[in-house]
Image (cartoon, helix red, strand yellow):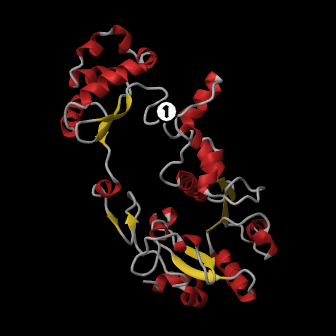
Amino acid sequence: MILGDLGADVIKVERSGQGDDTRGWGPPFDDRGESAYYLSINRNKLSVAADLANPEDRALLQQLVAEADVVVENFRPGTLERHGLGPDAMLAAHPRLIWCTITGFGLDSPRPGYDFVVQAESGWMAITGEPTGSPMKAGVAVADVLAGKDAAIAILAARAGGGRGARRLAVSLLQSATTALVNVAQNTMVSGREARRWGNAHANLVPYELFQAADRALVVAVGSDAQFAACVRALELPSLAADPELATNAGRLARRAEVVSAIADRVRTAPAVEWIARLDAAGVPCGVVKPVLEALQAVSASPLMGVAPQAPGTVRRPPPRLDEHGALVRRSGWAAFASAV
């Protein structure tokens, strides 16, 4: 979808009869019978259904691959090879082709890659949730999303290389998720100590967490000593402002409970809008905790097309129904885009 947003012509090849599994991941379903999950990631594509066991369909796929710039697939090892569509053979036959395989755990692993499993095995769940609670997954399929973005970046880099770089690309959910541990991974390697769950707090910064105002929750994200000084002035906390040990982040980390308690007691005395106004005026990063419907009001979004891409992306076609363009693609191949509405 990312590549489609950026202008690529994308043909989505799905299993005959059932199609993409996410078509059934509901409710909710829209008035066309498509699941919201499916709609969220499938705009700007044409759909054709095909059966690898069918010789005519295999011939169609071979023709589409021959004319394509890029193939993206997520089959288990050996599946495409058994049907004469393996990446090594296709790359040898078509010197300008780029092939990207997305897996759960690497090219040699037959394990199915589901985001929830990857969040468990990549360390994400171990660091997510309340300190005394159970490990918790993120509210969005973050490993899936990160792997998709990594794949798009790798494909664009390969295309920009003009055939001088790698043409066989492999992205795994596990690698994408583990790489995205960034500072948490580095903390554990530098310190030699296992990472822990911090809830809404931050392992390296204080104050950097959620506070409850008189009416709703807000977050304060102090990222520098200057911001801390501005924060305690805005909140009118002279005892924190005057304490030299709290002037540095290291000092605040050592006295985390004291600093957080003082700010929490102060913030709960007034509504969030008052604190946001004060902190914004002082240049302190902050924000209220918005439910999803409220958050969507700040962006361009629709029930059919999803959240609009950032520039230079554009939305040109709605998510296709299963095999909606099958006859057109079978008749015209990639030229189907010239007549597809």
Residue at figure coordinates x 66%, y 58% from the top left: 113
Vertical comparison of 180 with 291: above or below: above
Residue at figure coordinates x 76%, y 60% from the top left: 110
- Left/right placement of residue 177 relative to residue 222 reads right
**Which of 293/136 is in front?**
136
Quarter of the image where one finds residue 13: bottom right
Count of numbered marks: 1
Residue at figure coordinates x 47%, y 51% from the top left: 139
Quarter of the image where one finds residue 267: top left
**Which of 187/207 is in front?**
207
- Left/right placement of residue 118 relative to residue 279 reads right
**Residue 197, horizontal then vertical, whole percent:** 53, 34
**Which of 11/266 is in front?**
266
Residue linked to disc 1: 198
**Residue 211, horizontal then vertical, whole percent:** 32, 34
- Please, what is the three-letter code of the amino acid marked with disc 1? Trp
Vertical comparison of 306 with 267: above or below: below
**Residue 174, horizontal then vertical, whole percent:** 65, 49
Q: Secondary structure at mark 1?
A: loop
Quarter of the image where one finds residue 5: bottom left
Instruction: For residue 124, say whether it is visible.
Output: no
**Which of 67/72 is in front?**
72
Residue at figure coordinates x 76%, y 56% from the top left: 109
Task: Determine crowd level at label 1: few under 14, some 14-19, many 20+ residues with C-alpha closer than 10 A.
Answer: some
**Residue 207, horizontal then vertical, whole percent:** 37, 26
Viewport quadrant of the C terminus: bottom left
Instruction: For residue 127, say whether it is visible.
Output: yes
